[in-house]
Amino acid sequence: MWLRKCLDGFLNKAHCAMGTQRNGFSKKETFVLSVDVGTTSVRCHVYDKCANIRGSCSSKVSLLYPQPGWAEIDPEELWKGFVTVVKGAVQDSGLQMCQMEGLGISTQRATFLTWERNTGKPFHNFITWQDLRAAELARSWNRSCTMKMVQGVTKMLHFLTRQKRFLAASLVVFSTQHVSLRLVWALNNIPQLRQAVEDGTCYFGTIDTWLLYKLTKGAVHATDFSNASATGIFDSYQMCWSGFLCSLLSIPLSTLPKVQNTSHKFGSCDPSIFGVPIPIMCVMADQQAAMFGECCFDIGDVKITMGTGTFMDINTGNKPHTSVSGLYPLVGWKIGADVVFLAEGNAAGTGAAIKWAQDLELFTDVKETEAIATSVADSDGVYFVPSFCGLQAPLNDPKACASFMGLKPSTTKSHLVRAILESIAFRNKQLYDIMLGETHIPITKIRADGGVCTNDFIMQLTSDLLGRKIARPNHFDMSCLGAAFVAGLGTGYWRNQEELKKIQSTDQHFNPQRNKSEGDKGGQYRSVLQSWERALQRSMHWYSQP
């Protein structure tokens, strides 16, 4: 085995030398690798100095549904997919592994695993952010006398001290989207896990932590501030794991990973994996990575990602935002001593609504939807409520149902498609208004990404409703690019954020349209938006359980 590893390393270096000559690159030319582990796929890109993609590879993420409401991922399958896409992207680029200066990793948030620290054997599959097994636990906690007491005490502490962290604590409501109660469920229901906690041999981690552990052959148990802040057990005001919440929920702090800067040398990939020890320079949560990839570095910069769900983030500077309407305070990134915070609102089911309509054969190709929507003047009074997973901020109703309202004999497929696309833009308008009203931060720029932003109808209507110019990038894999940017800054591949802004590319700007006789398009939609909001109200509290 030892001889084989030495031989593999020698051959890799020899191939690298020949490859640089064959491809016409100087021996000093290097590149940055970046991997994004999303909800439905794992993607890897090789980036050059101008942030051009030199090679790519992707594989699907298989979601497992062992019981109704459960959503899992096989950790070993995910690991194999990760290794495959890295090797595939480098092969696709025609480069060699030794030309990879650093590796950045972006991952979906709040999907977690526990495993035996010495053997690396998982106690269960990844329990994803979509998993609902802790729904009853969340309801029980939110109705409990303990929570009412905690909220009352923290309100009093806020009144006495005026510290915002106490106001934030008084507004805490447990959700299945956060790690906290899903982890409590695992601790209560998996005997081997409980035993490992008692023995002090249990590791907990989100996807980034698991990948770091595997890449370094168990040498590193860590995460970064952006991922930690999305778990629901991290105190963004104190910048550490919340001892209070962990104590309240009986989550052992000893199992949690060390929290490092987003730009940090976490270690190097073991040479047995890729043939060379590639430095791991960044791990980052996907939405925060997309924000960085869009170069939203300044206070008031806004990013809208429209993919599986819609995520709207605003840069709030060096202080977390305390929300009363459901915006979530996140650590965007921490580089050196500088911390950037974000306030985030989300609307679940954006991509799901479009996929559902396609499955119903309202259209055959997603690219057709723009033409279908514009083939009619309006939706003919039809409104769609996109709440397959309930309604998030600002209504925050997990019991809301998805619905069409205003159907009539004259309704056609085109009206239905237009109503679906309009509903996505309407939710964008809702999130934007609550963000403006709560943060009181002047908006400096808005950039959009994600697969749904390729639809010009949604982009233009969103611009009209917001009354703001929106920029769309040339390619939409911003999470991967953001992790690459942070990793490249860490190695010195790129000098600073100003250099990143200069190489940022934009495909198209969408400006609010105006009609000479009727005024701005957003104003024309005012009555339509009001009717849609009535439809929202009628869809709320439909189910007896979330």
Image (cartoon, rainbow, N blue to C red):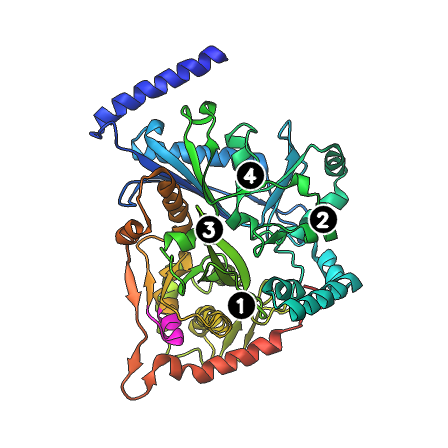
Q: Residue furthest left?
A: 24
- Mark 2 crowd level (few <14, some 14–19, many ≥20, 10 Å Cα): some
Say left or right for 90 vs 439: left
**Which three-letter amino acid code belongs to the residue tagged 2?**
Val
Can residue 333 be seen by looking at this rendering? yes
Of the two numbered discs 4 and 2 on the same chain, state the one appearing first in sequence: 2
For marks 1 and 2, give the CA distance.
30 Å
**Which three-letter amino acid code belongs to the residue tagged 3?**
Trp
Which residue is labeled 4 in the image?
Answer: 222
Which residue is labeled 3 in the image?
Answer: 333
Q: Mark 2 and mark 1 in contact (Cβ < 8 Å)?
A: no
Q: Secondary structure at mark 1?
A: loop
Residue 252: percent from left, percent from top: 70, 43
Front label number (4 vs 1): 4
Q: Which residue is at 73% across, 63% downward?
A: 150
**Which three-letter amino acid code belongs to the residue tagged 4?**
Ala
Of the two numbered discs 1 and 2 on the same chain, state the one appearing first in sequence: 2
Numbered range of the magenta stretch: 460-469
Q: Which quarter of the rendering shows the C terminus?
A: bottom right
Of the two numbered discs 3 and 1 on the same chain, state the one appearing first in sequence: 3
Residue 466 among those drawn in magenta: yes
Q: Which mark is residue 386?
A: 1
Which residue is labeled 2 in the image?
Answer: 184
Q: Main secondary structure of the magenta part?
A: helix
Q: Which residue is at 31% across, 18% downward?
A: 14
Of the two numbered discs 3 and 2 on the same chain, state the one appearing first in sequence: 2
Residue 338: percent from left, percent from top: 44, 51
For residue 314, above or below residue 77: below
